[in-house]
Each structure stands twice: as structure tokens, then as C-alpha cells.
Image: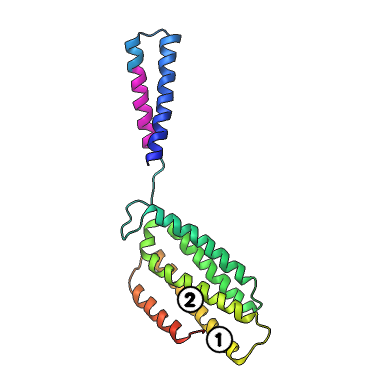
Amino acid sequence: MKKFTTLAGIIAGIAAGAVLLGLYFLLQFSLIITVALALASYFGIYLILFAIRPKDRFINLGDGINAEMLQTVLRESEEKIGELQKMEKQIKDEQIRSKIDHIIGTVQKIYENIRKDPEKMKIAKQFLSYYFDTCISIVKKYTQLSSQEVQSNEISKALQKAEIMLSSIDVAFEKQLAKLLSNDVMDLDVEIETLEKTFKAEDLN
């Protein structure tokens, strides 16, 4: 806002200066009239620029969410999606790749929904901060284990657990997208708590 105010003042000042020079030297208006019209031009242009300024849709959303936070979340989401896509390419199992690809598609829809309606960040922030990071950790672990040359019984069990957990996350993201689209905020804490218990029970370590 401060930068815009400064820029608007500069533009209005330049325009007013041009009006003053044109009226006084070219059209030879009286000094008083020239100054009056130049001042009117300055404030008129300034008010017009202020009226058409880009609106910040991310202001005053409550729950500790501000413009900087939202912009950071959206930027980091692109980085995390890129990380998932990179790991997906390293996985040989076609079904797992397809599942990860579906998760990525759902996540992109969630963030696109937030981008269009930033107030929905209040609904999604807790969900995304837990589920998305957990998803990345699971895929990272799966990538590491599946790349092992020797597949022991323990590794096979761990991979199976990871597949189950990815399926749970896939369903959870679909539910969250549906909630965003319907503005439903009910039972979200319960869903997160349930999934946390599931992940603890299916510990990959």
C-alpha cells in the first residue's frame, strides 16, 4: 500500500506539472488559474489511481492469516508439488505413481480453490500443514525403500504400509476438496486426529 501511494503521488505530480506548463506557457493562462487547475489535476488523478488500485484480497482474513502468509503458503505449495512430481518419476510401480499423480491433482485443485477464494485458507490451513507434509514424507520414504537393490521382508512390509497410508491421504485430500467447495468446516479436527492415529499405527520406521 505504501509503495502504491508513493507511485500514485509521483504519477499525479508529473501529470499536474504537465498541466501547469501547458496552461501557463503554451496557452498563457493566468498564474492563479493555472495553479488552481494544476492542483485540481493532481488530486483528481491521485483519487482516480487510488480508486482503480489493485485490491488485495488477502487482507484481514482473521485467524492469524495475512497477505504475506498466504503468498508464502501458495509459493511453498508449488515447491512441494514439484518435489512430489520429481519423486513420482523415480518410482517404478505404475499403480503407486498413478496414486501419487491423483493426489497431486487434488492438491492442485485445493490450492487453486484457495487462490480464487483466499478466505478458504482458514478452512484448509491446518489440514494442509499436516497432510501435505506427511504425504511428502511417506513418498520420500517409499522412494528410498523401493530403490533398494535387496528387498527384504521388512522392506516389503514397509512398502505395503506406505501404500495404505498413501491411500488414506488420497481419500483425505478428496474429502478436503469437497469441504472447500461446500464451505464445510465440520469434523475436520476429528479427521486429522483419526489420520494421525492411523499413521502412528502404520509407522514405517
* Magenta stretch holds residue 38: yes
Structural crowding at the residue carrying mark 2, measured as other residues with C-alpha within 10 Å and reported as few (<14), some (14–19) or many (≥20): many
Query: Is 185 a magenta residue?
Result: no
| Residue at position x 55%, y 86% in the image | 158
Location of mark 2 (residue)? 169
Q: Amino acid at mark 2?
A: Ile
Instruction: Please provide percent x and percent y for residue 98.
Output: 60, 74
Give amino acid for label 1.
Ala
The stretch in magenta equals 37-52
Labelled disc at residue 37: none
Q: Looking at the rendering, which quadrant does residue 7 occupy? A: top left
* Secondary structure of residue under mark 1: helix
Image quarter hosting the N terminus? top left
Whether residue 33 appears in this view of the structure is: yes
Relative image position of residue 69 (x, y in whole percent): 40, 57
Q: Earlier in the sequence, mark 1 or mark 2?
A: 1
Q: Secondary structure at mark 2?
A: helix
Residue that appears at 49% across and 63% down: 109
